[in-house]
């Protein structure tokens, strides 16, 4: 006994079929498909139950309910449900099934264009069944099935069909009509329609059938149609006109047939050209033909080569001493070729002094050491491309890691000898020898790359090498170079060398810019660095520190003289005179600067005799050519005028430079690193 789901158990088995149907209709309104299944089951509506089960694959609930409505005859409800869920494809099928063709076409044109041609076709079939052939023909055309369906539909009315075909001017229809006429033995009319359809194969076929082979040949030659040419070639072959048959087989791209005829009839001249146009298999067969004949072996070699059968081509070329062919074949050899074959070819090229090609083949055969040795023996320049081919990757199984590195170093050594320093650097780096790489880079003189390489290498020795190189440049005018020198010496823990650099900076400040304050700062930095340096000889270090301390003291005294002159001129002059008595003054302070200071002072005080005395002392200690660097011609003239002495000849004009302060900024972070270095 069945019960209503959710009921208290009241039996419905006694309900009439009409009640179940009404309940099923209510399910359409409430969209309760689970209840509808029970209703259809009790109604015994097997077809509806099946349709509902098949509709379960539809994702939209409305589409599934619409199927239920259709089974219950609720067509208006089904239509609204399909529209509501926008399932125009199902709505289209619904209209077709319910014979509402205008609506079906309208829906297909507006919303269901995927099925538009199918809708047109189905409507045309419907119209044909309704004997409305005129309208059916129009819809067959719209569905693009008229080329087959219209001839079928009008097959009983040949006059109308002929008129329709002539009206449409369609090649497919013309061909169909020509085939029909041919079947009726109306050959002349069939030829006319084949010509309209541009069916050259059929034209040639009929002309051959009629025995007009000359006309058929004209058509095949003019059009170049493969099928027509092939058919005509078969005709000529059957008539034993070999040359014509070969010609038309060639036009038809049927090279194997043309080759077969050439072999059978000894047409060797044509055979070679045909084989080159044909497939590799045909090339090999033709090459064997030439080889077996023992004549024209150069053709056999060429065909084996073109077919990709390099080993056979080379074997035959070596056997028959065809050196020109060997060169052509060798150009197509690569690393995928047989190593033994490559080695044999390289030996051949070495014999004939074509070393570059021999090296290429040795590299392709992975005989790297032999290729490198040949380059060395023949003094060949190793290009970057050759070097890359000689470079074995790390994951390669051809060489061990040790052998790989050794090979890379040998390549780099060779590049060094030929002056390819950048390439040598690259190979040394790949071999893991960064020191040699840096030496090669230093020889190249590429400052930018040297600085970059030192930065990425992070090795003390390399930092020092880079800094030493940078010192050879004009670091006085390039602040960035000076910064890099300080940075590299610091990172390389070469504090003694850094101290020497600071000492040099101090001397430049004095000699070129007369900036004693800057010089004192540089000497101070030099002293700090040298004091922290780990010296190999403590005695030498102490001596250098003492020298630096002495320099710092002298420079500081001269700075003090200049600073206190306005407050206490007498003391300043006294200190200047004491400075002149210092034994090592020349190595630190420019004597001319001290004398210039004294001369200017005594001239200002109008003590011309004393000024002249210091001017003369200055002449004795400093070359005449350098006098103008310290005392201007005007000052010298004033001294002489004050004493009533004749004026001397003019001195060269004095040249002055800007201070290094305009060119250099000491890297504070680097200096701090030096100070904090343990």
Image (spheres, rainbow, N blue to C red):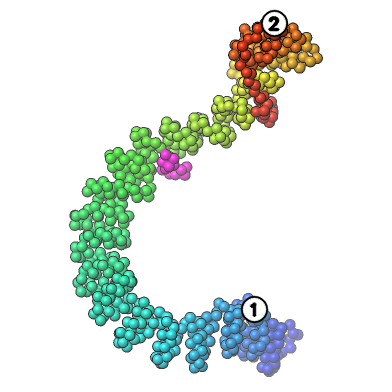
Q: Which mark is residue 541?
A: none
Where is mark 1, residue-wise?
86
Element on which disc 1 rests: loop
Residue at screen point 30% across, 68% down: 251
**Rendered-image quadrant of the N terminus:** bottom right
Q: Is residue 639 left or right of residue 444?
A: right
Residue 428 x/y as whole percent = 48, 35
Q: Position of residue 500 (x, y in %)?
A: 61, 21
Location of residue 450 (image quadrant): top right
Instruction: Please determine whether, in this image, residue 461 is positioned above or below residue 193.
Output: above
Inspect this view and state whether residue 527 appears: no
Quadrant the C terminus occupies: top right
Q: Residue at x 30, y 61 (%)?
A: 277
The residue depicted at 28 percent of the width and 56 percent of the height is 303
Instruction: Identify the image quadrant of residue 470.
Output: top right
Separation of residues labelled 1 and 2 (CA atoms): 122 Å
Query: Picture coordinates of residue 434 (x, y %)?
Result: 51, 33
CB atoms at circles 1 and 2 under 8 Å apart? no
Q: Nearer the viewer, mark 1 or mark 2?
A: 2
Q: Earlier in the sequence, mark 1 or mark 2?
A: 1
Is residue 384 within the magenta segment?
A: yes
Please tell me whether residue 332 is drawn above or below residue 144 in the rendered image.
above
According to the image, label 2 marks what residue? 644
Name the quadrant containing residue 296: bottom left
Where are the magenta residues, as a range? 383-398
The local crowd at label 2, few if under 14, some if 14 to 19, many if 20 or more residues have their Cα within 10 Å, is few
The answer to whether any part of residue 276 appears in the image is yes
Residue in view at x 67 percent, y 86 percent? 77
- State the residue in front, 647 or 233: 647
Classify 99 as above or below 324: below
């Amino acid at each position: 006994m069945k019960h209503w789901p959710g009921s208290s158990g009241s039996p419905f088995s006694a309900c009439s079929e009409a009640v179940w149907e009404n309940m099923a209709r209510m399910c359409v309104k409430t969209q309760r498909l689970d209840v509808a299944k029970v209703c259809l089951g009790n109604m015994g509506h097997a077809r509806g139950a099946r349709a509902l089960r098949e509709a379960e694959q539809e994702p939209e609930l409305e589409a599934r309910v619409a199927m239920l409505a259709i089974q219950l005859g609720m067509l208006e409800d089904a239509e609204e449900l399909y529209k509501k869920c926008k399932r125009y494809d199902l709505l289209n099928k619904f209209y077709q099934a319910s014979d509402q063709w205008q609506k079906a076409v309208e829906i297909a044109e507006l919303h269901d264009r995927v099925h538009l041609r199918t809708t047109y076709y189905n409507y045309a079939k419907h119209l044909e069944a309704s004997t409305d052939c005129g309208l059916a023909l129009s819809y067959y055309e719209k569905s693009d099935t008229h080329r087959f369906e219209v001839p079928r539909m009008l097959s009983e009315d040949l006059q109308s069909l002929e008129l329709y075909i002539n009206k449409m001017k369609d090649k497919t229809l013309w061909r169909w009509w020509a085939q029909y006429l041919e079947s009726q033995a109306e050959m002349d009319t069939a030829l006319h329609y084949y010509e309209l359809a541009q069916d050259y194969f059929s034209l040639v076929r009929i002309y051959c059938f009629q025995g007009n082979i000359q006309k058929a040949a004209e058509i095949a030659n003019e059009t170049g149609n493969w099928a027509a040419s092939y058919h005509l070639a078969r005709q000529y072959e059957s008539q034993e006109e070999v040359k014509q048959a070969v010609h038309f087989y060639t036009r038809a791209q049927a090279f194997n047939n043309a080759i077969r005829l050439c072999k059978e009839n000894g047409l060797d001249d044509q055979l070679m050209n045909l084989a080159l146009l044909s497939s590799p298999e045909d090339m090999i067969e033709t090459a064997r033909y030439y080889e077996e004949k023992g004549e024209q072996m150069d053709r056999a070699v060429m065909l084996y080569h073109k077919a990709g059968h390099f080993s056979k081509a080379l074997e035959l070329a070596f056997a028959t001493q065809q050196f020109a062919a060997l060169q052509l074949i060798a150009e197509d050899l690569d690393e995928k070729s047989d190593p033994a074959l490559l080695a044999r070819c390289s030996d051949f090229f070495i014999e004939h002094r074509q070393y570059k090609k021999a090296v290429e083949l040795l590299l392709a055969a992975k005989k790297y050491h032999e290729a490198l040795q040949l380059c060395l023996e023949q003094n060949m320049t190793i290009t970057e491309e050759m070097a890359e081919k000689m470079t074995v990757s790390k994951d390669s199984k051809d060489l061990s890691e040790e052998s790989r590195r050794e090979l890379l170093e040998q390549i780099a050594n060779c590049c060094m000898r030929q002056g390819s320093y950048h390439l040598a650097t690259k190979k040394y780096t790949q071999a893991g020898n960064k020191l040699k790489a840096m030496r090669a880079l230093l020889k190249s003189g590429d400052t930018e790359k040297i600085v970059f390489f030192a930065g990425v290498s992070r090795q003390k020795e390399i930092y020092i090498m880079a800094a030493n190189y940078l010192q050879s440049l004009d670091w006085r005018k390039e602040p960035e170079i000076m910064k890099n020198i300080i940075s590299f010496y610091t990172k390389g823990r070469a504090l003694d060398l850094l101290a020497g650099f600071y000492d040099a900076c101090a001397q430049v400040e004095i000699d070129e810019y007369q900036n004693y304050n800057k010089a004192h700062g540089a000497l101070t930095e030099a002293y700090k660095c040298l004091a922290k340096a780990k010296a190999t000889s403590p005695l030498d270090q102490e001596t250098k520190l003492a020298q630096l301390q002495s320099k710092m003291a002298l420079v500081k005294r001269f700075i003090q003289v200049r600073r206190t002159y306005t407050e206490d001129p007498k003391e300043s002059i006294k200190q200047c005179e004491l400075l002149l008595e210092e034994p090592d003054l020349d190595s630190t302070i420019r004597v001319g600067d001290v004398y210039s200071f004294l001369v200017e002072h005594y001239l200002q005080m109008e003590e011309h005799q004393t000024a002249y005395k210091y001017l003369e002392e200055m002449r004795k200690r400093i070359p005449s050519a350098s006098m103008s660097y310290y005392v201007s011609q005007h000052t010298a003239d004033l001294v002489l005028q004050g004493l009533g002495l004749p004026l001397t000849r003019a001195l060269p004009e004095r040249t002055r430079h800007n201070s290094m302060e305009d060119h250099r900024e000491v890297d504070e972070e680097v200096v701090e690193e030096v100070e904090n270095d343990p």
